Image: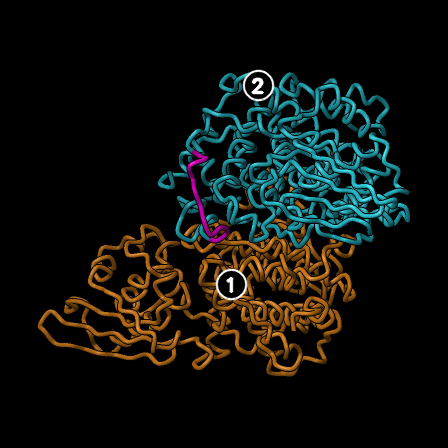
Chain colours: A orange, B cyan
Amino acid sequence: MSADLTSTVSTFVAELNWSDVPEPARAAARRTAANVIGLSVGAAHSAAAEAVLGAAADLGQQGGAQVLGRAETLTAPWAALVNGLTAHVEDFDDTYLSCILHPGAPIVPAALAAAELVGADGETLMTGVVAGVEVASRLGDSLWPSHFDRGWHVTATTGPIGAACAAARVLGLDAARTAHAIAIAATQAAGHTEQLGSMTKSFQVGRAAATGVEAALLAEQGFTGPVEPLAGRRGMSALMATEVDWAPMADLGHRWLVESNALKPYSCGIVSHPVIDAGRRLRAGGLEPAHVGSVELQVHPRVLDVMGVTEPVDGLRSKFSVYHCFAVGLLRGAGGPPEFSDTAAVDPEITDIRGRVTVALDPALAADACRAVVTTTDGRTVELTVDHATGSIDAPMSDEELRAKVVTLAGRLDNPDRLWDVARRLDDIGSAEDLFAVAG
Amino acid sequence: MSADLTSTVSTFVAELNWSDVPEPARAAARRTAANVIGLSVGAAHSAAAEAVLGAAADLGQQGGAQVLGRAETLTAPWAALVNGLTAHVEDFDDTYLSCILHPGAPIVPAALAAAELVGADGETLMTGVVAGVEVASRLGDSLWPSHFDRGWHVTATTGPIGAACAAARVLGLDAARTAHAIAIAATQAAGHTEQLGSMTKSFQVGRAAATGVEAALLAEQGFTGPVEPLAGRRGMSALMATEVDWAPMADLGHRWLVESNALKPYSCGIVSHPVIDAGRRLRAGGLEPAHVGSVELQVHPRVLDVMGVTEPVDGLRSKFSVYHCFAVGLLRGAGGPPEFSDTAAVDPEITDIRGRVTVALDPALAADACRAVVTTTDGRTVELTVDHATGSIDAPMSDEELRAKVVTLAGRLDNPDRLWDVARRLDDIGSAEDLFAVAG
């Protein structure tokens, strides 16, 4: 599979049409896009977004491309950057759990910026989204697990390639130019998990979207790279993973991985979602926080790789604390942006429960499962197992739950329901303008 | 040294003044900058530059920052991108051989774009250049050799951090914000040697310059990253090198590595420079190309890592062919841009000699040395050893040779000598405008 890998991928991207995409994949792509748009509108005034908008002004990036949820328009790459950052900053987006990839945030904004540049219609835009998700998901799977285990932020590393494929398809590049767009994006693949819990985590995802747009436009202008940027001897996979298996690429166009992209009901690292469920269910079962003596959480071994922050001092860091996740589930019965705010991170009630939690790793547990063993102050033991976290592919958010999420996120708008009506079926729009008319 | 590494680096950068820089380091920095400016002017109309300029127009990147050697002005990051690309595209720039880093191309354009943004004077600009070179060179040394051996393009990976330091210093950021600029740049560190021999090789160096400018402006706006992006558990060094030794960082501000940055007399991969010398000396010694039966080149083992292209089909690829390098040295007595053009790559006389060359690796040879053993058609053996390649730190280009190089590169300008007069002492200019007045 590694011979001609990039050629195979670029041919798939260039030749994909909306009519090739089966209805379940279309529906999944629509949900992915609607979720991203709600998130981008919702976080449009976050501190990270404000700082990037400030730098964009200093760097002369005023332009004609829309920033979702704001009045400002920027150049195409910077609009993609901001929209990608805001889609990801709350860690509330979507997850292809197989390789812990969040494909929506880098890919949808890149497709949108490209569509705006050339006036593409909704079907073309969504064809780009599907192409990007299919490629990035398989690239992540091919490099899994050594790429992730080394500490690469999979969304930031495979995102530029997915975003480049999306933008190339929207621009209508042929297979040869799409391959060069992939090369230009692949050699910029970057992003360290050291950056989790800081503004840069979402920046590198936004930057992936911008890279994709730039790569596609450069390739369109005749800019060229090497023949095999992904599988070559000194290419992306050789440098960024110790074991590579390209088998996942084999069913490109036959199986649709976008259908396995799950939307997040909680705004924090995905691997802690079952822990929030555990807290919520214990609360629903009547466990009083005041009666909690100690809690042992039994979790999948990867949880502490990314969620090991014991005493988060601010909201962004609390998203990477499995201890905080359990505490807000139990105390608030929720796990949305308010539960991961700067205020919540230092709330005395929450820090008290956090301090009572210990974690035990259990390799036998699935990534979307956990067990909680609570010892109460009066000496009882309460046990609870979560088999599949809410929002996982086995317990997905319903369309109605997604609508509620998007409408809540878009609460700042005059008419959030109108945004939902457009965002939920992006393939029906005549051009990106139809979306921007209801997202500003 | 790894505790507080980023803090140590950012404090050095923020506190460095031109008056702290000893005269030999100042002189070396001036030469580095003048060389870059000549190269950027010389390659301003190369095919890679034209393609990037085309994409810049499509992406709304018209702005107020000068592209060296052209009439166009772009936004600050894109001006830095183009100037960095054109400084590097001919593989004719400079080399800190200790870790095979070409610091000038990512760092000088970033400092220049930042200086233009804030109207900084020449001494501030050059202080930024020195800060960037000192940091990037030590970062490369700290990751050497596993980072290089894995296949990372050191100039593209350490370049963004050097460029961010340069831009941060020019903007006058304090140590805390400089540290965040380093974090923003570090997590974008990227660039594969698979891309050598294609346009993307110089793009990723130009992109490093742009990343540095953007990182500094983002940090100035309050954008933040993690505390230890370089040495942290999941940070740059952990992900991009298997062995790391931060000892080279210890003498930051005490020893000046910019003095070890050598300017290239030949426009190709540095490790082949002794081979061009060998060809030139054999030619000077009277060896007739027609009498060459076969040639064995004995070279440092790293030569074939990057210079192993046996039958380059175009100019960019010929820069990574040790076989081509020997042939042009022997046949043309030169190794400048004309010898690595698309025409030269397929010249029958050159391809004939290339086909007679074999390479033997000798670990005992230094990286700037080689031996050539020629067997003539009439059965004689001619041997020649190059101890230190022309342009290496032990046989540096003279100021007069540098002047000739810059003036030749700037041949398109009305008055190339005027460019040299300004470029050779950038610390004397009142603002970047003084340079642009003679470089357009």
Report in which chain the residue with disc 1 lies: A
Q: Which x, y percent locates residue B368?
A: 64, 36
The tag on residue B24 is 2
In the image, residue B248 lies in the stretch drawn in magenta: yes
Considering only vertical position in the picture, is A271 above or below B291? below
Instruction: Specify the quadrant that holds the N terminus of chain B.
Output: top left
Q: Amino acid at mark 1?
A: Thr
Residue located at (46% from left, 48% from top): B237
Magenta range is B239-249
Q: In front here: A395 or B211?
A: B211
Please state if B81 lies on the left or on the right of B316 as rendered.
left
The tag on residue A242 is 1
Q: Is label 1 in a helix, a strand or a loop? A: loop
Residue furthest to the left in view is: A378
Q: Are marks 2 and 1 on the same chain?
A: no
Considering only vertical position in the picture, is A99 above or below B289? below
Q: In front here: B419 or A44?
A: B419
Residue located at (61% from left, 21% from top): B121
In the image, residue B352 lies in the stretch drawn in magenta: no
Q: Which of the 4 quarters of the picture holds residue A189? A: bottom right
Q: In front here: B374 or B327?
A: B374
Residue located at (59% from left, 79% from top): A27
Q: Which of the 4 quarters of the picture holds residue A306? A: bottom left
Task: Please indicate, yes or no, whether residue B54 appears anywhere in the rendered image.
Answer: no
Task: Please indicate, yes or no, whether residue A192 appears anywhere in the rendered image.
Answer: yes
Q: Which x, y percent locates residue A237?
A: 58, 62
Q: Within 10 Å of the Cα at label 1, are there few (<14), some (14-19), or many (20+) other Cα atoms?
A: some
Residue located at (83% from left, 30% from top): B284
Q: Which x, y percent locates residue B178?
A: 47, 35
Q: Amino acid at mark 2?
A: Pro
Label 2 – label 1 distance at C-alpha:
44 Å
Q: Within 10 Å of the Cα at label 2, are there few (<14), some (14-19), or many (20+) other Cα atoms?
A: few
